[in-house]
Image (cartoon, rainbow, N blue to C red):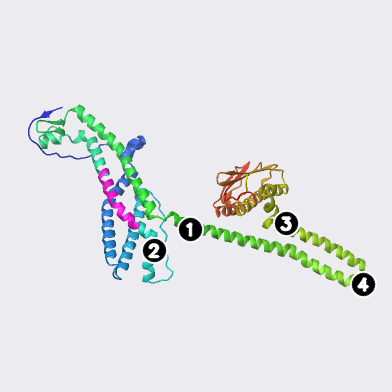
Amino acid sequence: MATEYGQGYGLDSGSGFPGSTERRHRLPAVLRAPVEGRTWRELTHVLLSLPISILLFTYAVTMVSLGAGLLVTFLGVPVLAAALAGCRGFGALERTRARGLLGLEVAEPEPLRMRKPGAMAWMGAVLKSGASWRALLYAVLQLPWSVFSFVVAVNVWVLGWALLTYPLWFWVFPVYAGQEGVQLYGDEAHRIYLDNPFEITVTALVGLLVTIATPWIVRALTMVDRLMVHGLLGPSRLVSRVVELESDRGVVVDTAAADLRRIERDLHDGAQARLVALAMDLGLAKEKLQEDPRAAARMVDEAHGEVKTALQELRDLARGIHPAVLTDRGLDAALSAVASRCTVPVQVEVDLAERPAPAIEGIAYFTVSELLQNVSKHARATWAGVEVWRTENRLMLQVVDNGVGGADVSQGSGLAGLADRLDAVDGILVVDSPAGGPTRVTAELPWRGEHVR
């Protein structure tokens, strides 16, 4: 270590890297990170954030301040609306930049909702939109964060590469600056330089550590950018939930319409047709009552059989709409009744201290009923089991069979419709059915319970 006594001097620095990119795939990930494309894209994002945030902040503050100052006149409203609309436009740019440089996919926020066309309706929609105000908040918060991340990223990046490549350019100091190397310490009495081989090597090693750490530091900085873009420039959770509920409501409406069509078809093709035939038979029996009492009695006897059949069909139809045993005695008795009609032996275990809400109870009943119908029709099983229990605020159902397996929700079968029906009430359907079996279908429903009635 050399020590020089004298006056001050200037310091120049440079950067460079002697490595070859052809062999970086042979290096561990921690060593590849400083030269990987993802790292350079994230650094580019940090570097671009500063000028973009300055422009966005200046626009937002200027326009909002102008609009707020002009609110005493009519001009303030359109200026403020234009400010928010501009922030939404910048938000679209930021989502595109995040998608290209950070690989972050963020959906567009909710569109403006205008009841009628026109400039006034547009301004009102912009001012009422939560996405507009979130974009303005992003414009305000982005500047201080981009300044901080820019300073940290640039300084760490330059420091790491400068120290790492110090053995390549330390000769600049004695040749052009009149000193032995980079000054490590200096005061009026003496100065310390990094100039001997040991100190140069240690400097390069420190630079290597800083260079290796730099990508992870930049990545941590961009994580905040990801959170800001996702939280402030994407759709809000409330709006997303509303859209989801609207979609679920459509599923419920479609399901209800399909159920009504099924009931109408069953009535038309079943009980109604039998009752029409019964009315015709009774009419013929009435005509023959005087002429041929025996034939009339025989026809009445046949009509009596038709009445019994029609009543049974009506009972089956009523049970399909909502079984009385479910209302009166709960899931245990209702599922036992369903299991007794299955073509294979079914073991039913219901462990519930209280009953869920009637709507959830009905969905649970029809879920198990449809799953057992699938077992009867498609599984080619010799045994099935049904379990029902409660876990915290969720009602759990599980139907297992030892059949051939191969059930798949994605094939658009009845399981897909069942999954949609459960999803409409925040339920989940999970199917585990490898080829060769066994099949295990688990359904999860919100409890929304009531105390035992």
Q: Nearer the viewer, residue 277 or 387?
A: 387
What secondary structure is marked by label 1? helix
**Residue 291 shows which numbered tag?**
4
Say which amino acid is labelled 3: Asp
Residue hosting label 3: 316
Residue hosting label 2: 128
Dots 2, 4 in contact, CB < 8 A? no
Residue hosting label 1: 243
Q: CA distance from mark 1 to mark 2?
A: 18 Å
* Up-down relation of residue 223 to residue 197 (above or below): below
What secondary structure is marked by label 2? helix
Tell which circle, 1 or 2, labels the residue nearer the N-terminal end: 2
Say which amino acid is labelled 2: Lys
Residue occupying the point 38% across, 72% down: 118
Tell me where the magenta segment starts and ends, as one range.
135-152
Pointer 4 local density, CA inside 10 Å: few below 14, some 14–19, many at least 20: few
Tell which circle, 2 or 3, labels the residue nearer the N-terminal end: 2
Tell which circle, 4 or 3, labels the residue nearer the N-terminal end: 4
What secondary structure is marked by label 3? helix
Residue occupying the point 27% across, 51% down: 50
Residue 309, position as x, y percentages in the image: 79, 59
Task: Say which of marks 1 and 2 sits in front.
Answer: 2
Pointer 1 local density, CA inside 10 Å: few below 14, some 14–19, many at least 20: few
Using the rendered view, name the quadrant where residue 303 is placed.
Answer: bottom right
Q: Is residue 46 visible?
A: yes
Dots 4, 3 in contact, CB < 8 A? no
Q: CA distance from mark 4 to mark 1?
A: 71 Å
**Residue 218 shows which numbered tag?**
none
Magenta region, mostly helix, strand or loop?
Answer: helix
Say which amino acid is labelled 1: Val
Quarter of the image with the N terminus in it = top left
Pointer 3 local density, CA inside 10 Å: few below 14, some 14–19, many at least 20: few
